[in-house]
Amino acid sequence: MSYMTDRKRADRWGSAKSGTQHFWRVKVQSVALLVLIPLFLIAVAPIIGADYAAVTDHFARPLPALIAALTITVSFLHFADGFQVLVEDYVHGIWEKVLIIGMTCLCWGASAVAIFAIARMAL
Amino acid sequence: MADVNRGNRPLSPHLQVYRPQLTSITSILTRITGNALLLSMLMIVCWLIGAASGPDAFAAVDGIVTSWLGILIFALSIWALWYHFLAGIRHLIWDSGVGLDVPTAEKLGWACVIGSGVLWVVTLIALALF
């Protein structure tokens, strides 16, 4: 016979803390990527593997530069949020925090590098 | 609930005795492809910063990107990209509250598997031609 209440058993074990915000953010990113990914495959992917002059000329044009910057930025936001769910499912304790923080920093850093590189060629 | 018997409940499926189904395999593939795409996206970022830094830096990065391993990673990533793309559409359909019964879920699963294969081949041919 236990005197523990339902509330006491459930306390601190709930999964829903800020989940709906995260869910909605990922949903918005995914819809944006449905548009951006085909554009990226048409306007950016074919130039990968070309020579230096062709690549810098390509990103001097506004549309490839904008499509690349947007696709890469939204993709990294999507990576950070998706990876967070992966880690939350399989890793617990200190490594859960280390991996989520590390991946978030990597994603913001990588998008900053990409935007800087594209801006340098575009402007 | 407060005094419920907690010792005699069915256990959740264990990996060792779990019979894989189309729905479970297509679900885990969504997660694997999504996370694996990080590799090729980081390669593209390296390639961009190389191109922005000058001809020497570009040559070094381009050598890695256009090596057989780089091309293999990009070629496989295009399949992963289309698979995750279609699986994402499937999730958007499910999120709207339709297609959640097993026959429809399995049809959508096959749509992801076959659709991603078709789009992969079409994209590889298009990239090889242009």
Image (cartoon, coloured by chain):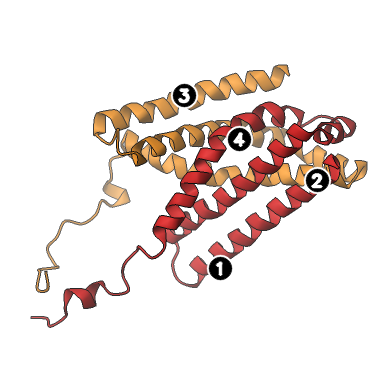
Chain colours: A red, B orange
Crowding at dot 4, Cα within 10 Å, few <14 / some 14-19 / many 20+, comes out as some
Q: Which mark is residue A119?
A: 2
Discs 3 and 2 share one subunit: no
Q: Under tag 4, what secondary structure?
A: helix
Q: Position of residue B47 (x, y in %)?
A: 77, 42
Q: Residue at x 64, y 18 (%)?
A: B125
Q: How many C-alpha atoms fall within 10 Å of the one at disc 3: few (<14), some, or many (≥20)?
A: some
| Dot 1 alpha-carbon crowd within 10 angstroms: few under 14, some 14 to 19, many 20 or more | few
Foreground: disc 3 or disc 4? 4
Q: How many marks?
A: 4
Residue where numbered disc 1 is placed:
A98
Q: Is B64 rendered above or below residue A78?
A: above
> Which amino acid type corresponds to the residue marked 2 in the rendered image?
Ala
Are dots 4 and 2 on a single chain? yes
Query: CA separation, marks 3 and 1?
Result: 37 Å
Give the farthest residue toward the bottom. Answer: A3
Q: CA distance from mark 3 to mark 4?
A: 19 Å
Q: CA distance from mark 3 to mark 2?
A: 35 Å
Q: Given the image, what chain letter belongs to the residue carrying mark 2? A: A
Q: CA distance from mark 2 to mark 1?
A: 31 Å
Q: Chain of mark 3?
A: B
Element at label 1? helix
